[in-house]
Amino acid sequence: MATVDITDATFEKTVSDSEIVLVDFWATWCPPCKMFGPVFEASSDKNTDIVHAKVDTDANPGISSAAQVTSIPTLMAFRDGVLVFRQAGALPAKGLAEVVEAVRGLDMEVVKKDLAAQQN
């Protein structure tokens, strides 16, 4: 699956409608974002079962603010609509591959129970 651009208007639907979504928050003026972009694209080509989405922080300040993105690039991973990973900074290909495998391997029943316990 090719990388998709998402916006303030499409972010929530994209995250909630897909099992696994990786979101790259970036900007055109950001050198580390430009370095991470090809790594993210390669992951998208390799992991076609995962939605790889990009959010231009300048064009979409609403979701960037709501997600509390304070530095870019920031990578977020969602599984079943739940934020399960968040990290600022460009990852190397190996690091991104490790994130993908970790997110795939999550037991979401346990994750959801843990979240419920934290909220009580």
Image (spheres, rainbow, N blue to C red):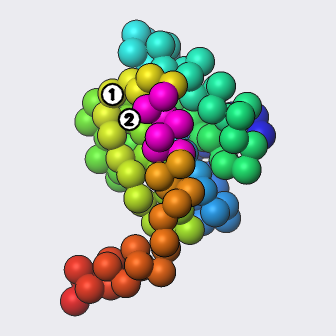
Main SS, magenta region, reads helix
Quadrant of res 54: top right
- Check whether the beta carbons of the residues at disc 2 and disc 1 lie within 8 A of each other: yes
Q: In the image, residue 15 lies at what x, y percent?
A: 58, 58
Neighbourhood count class around disc 1 (C-alpha, 10 Å): few under 14, some 14–19, many 20 upward: few
Q: How many marks?
A: 2
In the drawing, does residue 110 fall left or right of residue 18? left
- Which residue is the site of mark 2? 74
Q: What residue appears at the point 39 percent right and 15 percent down from the top-left corner?
A: 32
The quadrant of the rendering that contains the C terminus is: bottom left
Please, which residue is most extreme toward the bottom here?
120
- Identified by mark 1, the residue type is Gly
- Which residue is the site of mark 1? 89
- Helix, strand, or loop for circle 2? strand
Q: What residue appears at the point 47 percent right and 13 percent down from the top-left corner?
A: 35
108 over 75 or under it: above or below: below
- Helix, strand, or loop for circle 1? loop
8 over 112 or under it: above or below: above
Return the disc, 2 or 1, that comes first in the chain's sequence.
Answer: 2
Separation of marks 2 and 1 at Cα, in angstroms: 6 Å
- Identified by mark 2, the residue type is Thr
Nearer to the camera, 117 or 60: 117
Q: In the image, residue 83 lies at what x, y percent?
A: 42, 60
Q: In the image, residue 113 lies at what x, y percent?
A: 37, 84
For the record, the magenta segment spans: 94-100
